[in-house]
Amino acid sequence: MRLWKIGVKEKKAERLTDNKDRISSLFLSSDGHHAVTIHERSLSYEFDNKIKPAVFLYDLEKGEHKQIYNEAKYNISAIHWDRDSKGFYAVNQFTHDPRYVIAYIAEAHYFRLADGATAQVNLGWERGWPTRTIDLR
């Protein structure tokens, strides 16, 4: 439900999030400096798809966070961090339906921490590749 930082030696716990919703997924970077969370904001989303989950990026060193992938076209379901923790891949459940996420195509998007740039990843499938892309590497 909430994100906490626990100091074992200090025997101290510090709450990192001020959310009133539920954190359904947590994805910690391999270096431990960042985390991405997916917050469920509705108990009935799985059935009615009205209020989408929110995705947040946390800088655990600075104690800061910001919402990412908050445009209507994104339905982020999973995060996979790079081994060097300089960015991560987000799995987007893409659909043309403005509300329901029932039939979708799983797309990969890369998010670069240095500048917050994001772009869809070319998976080499002609039917799944967008007409406009950005090369982040």
Image (cartoon, rainbow, N blue to C red):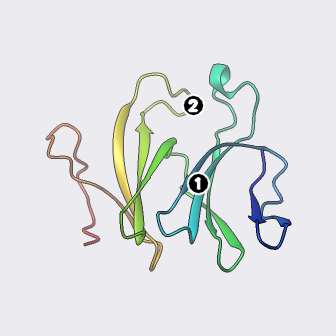
68 relative to 105 in the view: left or right: right
Q: Please, is residue 105 above or below residue 60 in the view?
A: above
Instruction: Please tell me the numbered disc located at residue 70.
Output: 1
Element carrying mark 2 = loop
Single out the mark in the foreground, 1 or 2.
1
Q: Please, is residue 36 above or below residue 60 in the view?
A: above
Question: Residue type at mark 1?
Answer: Asn
Label 2 environment density (alpha carbons within 10 Å; few <14, some 14–19, many ≥20): some
Residue 24 percent location from the top left of the image: 66, 40
- Seen from the viewer's position, the closer of residues 49 and 7 is 7
Spatial CA span between label 1 and label 2: 14 Å
Element carrying mark 1 = loop
Mark 1 touches mark 2? (CB < 8 Å): no
Residue 103 percent location from the top left of the image: 42, 23
In the orientation shown, which residue stands out farthest toward the front? 9
Q: What residue would you read off at disc 2?
A: 99
- Look at 37% across and 54% down and name the residue there: 109
Q: Please, is residue 63 above or below residue 18 in the view?
A: below
- Look at 51% across and 28% down and name the residue there: 101
Question: Residue type at mark 2?
Answer: Arg
| Label located before the other in sequence (1 or 2) | 1
Image quarter in which the N terminus is found:
top right
